[in-house]
């Protein structure tokens, strides 16, 4: 069955380190998204991509970057991790058809010390 | 500004219908109403969506008022596994991004 996976599921890092969170989907979806979820804020969009070589900034993109070199993967990079980036990160994908159902991964819990 | 308004929390007895309201009084003609839910520690899950007609699938029913200013998600026979945060989202046709509010925390009790 098609699925969307994230790795690692849990990560502890130190302030200032570069961190990359992986997202891989086997739906062959054109669209991929990264969200973060914090208490009191709900899910907020970080970056998204409508296809290979396409990336767009979301609501809270500062300090994050993404690149899309193939259809299946959209890695999220924290260039220099900050304590404010401690959060749960969710990746999602959608087909780009009119139905536009997003399918979410299981999430990555990131702690920045 | 939030496009939807939902109650913060609701309770429901197991086996009874859960009716979750959503107000979207500023919805425009080309905007859909989507419902997702998030069970604790999991990623959000799509439930149902509609434009102006009532919709039903294996998970739930969506009732949209004639003026489209509000809608109700109905879980016909709630189970303990339906305990989750339910998000009502308005999304413009042709756009792929979703904007999540704070949702309604539904607690289903025995």
Image (cartoon, rainbow, N blue to C red):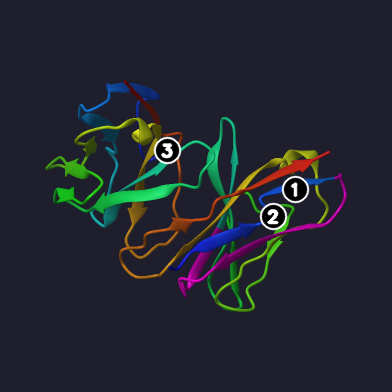
Residue A98 visible in image: yes
Residue at 26% from the left image edge and 46% from the top image edge: B59
* Alpha carbon distance from label 3 to label 2: 32 Å
* Alpha carbon distance from label 3 to label 1: 32 Å
Does mark 2 fall on the same chain as mark 1? yes
Q: Is residue A98 left or right of residue A90?
A: left
Mark sitting on residue B2: 3
- Quickly name the residue at label 2: A8
Q: Is residue A78 left or right of residue B43?
A: right
Q: Nearer the viewer, mark 3 or mark 2?
A: 2
- Quickly name the residue at label 1: A11
> Label 2 neighbourhood size at 10 Å, few (<14), some (14-19), many (20+)?
some
Chain for mark 1? A
Does mark 1 fall on the same chain as mark 3? no
| The N terminus of chain A - image quarter | bottom left
Magenta-drawn stretch contains B93? no
- Residue closer to the observer: A14 or B97: A14
In the rendered image, the vertical position of residue B82 relative to residue B42, given as above or below: above
Q: Nearer the viewer, mark 3 or mark 1?
A: 1
Q: Secondary structure at mark 2?
A: loop
Q: Which residues are magenta?
A: A14-33
Q: How many marks?
A: 3
Chain for mark 3? B
Residue at 47% from the left image edge and 73% from the top image edge: A30
Residue B33 visible in image: no
- Counting from the top left corner in percent of width and height, residue A88 is at 63, 43
Quarter of the view holding residue B12: top left
- Counting from the top left corner in percent of width and height, residue B103 is at 41, 34
Whether the residues at callouts 1 and 2 have beta carbons within 8 Å, the answer is yes
* Alpha carbon distance from label 1 to label 2: 6 Å
């Amino acid at each position: 069955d098609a699925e969307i996976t994230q790795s690692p599921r849990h990560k502890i890092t130190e302030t200032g380190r570069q961190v990359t969170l992986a997202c891989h989907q086997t739906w062959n979806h054109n669209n991929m998204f990264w969200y973060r979820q914090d208490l009191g804020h709900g899910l907020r969009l970080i970056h998204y991509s409508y296809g290979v070589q396409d990336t767009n900034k979301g609501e809270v993109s500062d300090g994050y970057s993404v690149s899309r070199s193939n259809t299946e993967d959209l890695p999220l990079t924290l260039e220099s991790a900050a304590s404010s980036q401690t959060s749960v990160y969710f990746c999602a994908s959608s087909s780009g058809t009119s139905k536009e159902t997003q399918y979410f991964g299981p999430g990555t819990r990131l702690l920045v010390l | 500004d939030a496009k939807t308004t939902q109650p913060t929390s609701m309770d429901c007895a197991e086996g009874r219908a859960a009716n979750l309201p959503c107000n979207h009084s500023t919805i425009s003609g080309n905007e859909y109403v989507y419902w997702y839910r998030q069970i604790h520690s999991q990623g959000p899950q799509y439930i149902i969506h509609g434009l102006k007609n009532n919709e039903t699938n294996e998970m739930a029913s969506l009732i949209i008022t004639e003026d489209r200013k509000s809608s109700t998600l109905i879980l016909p026979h709630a189970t303990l596994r339906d305990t989750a945060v339910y998000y009502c989202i308005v999304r413009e046709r042709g756009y792929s991004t979703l904007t999540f509010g704070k949702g309604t925390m539904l607690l289903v009790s025995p």
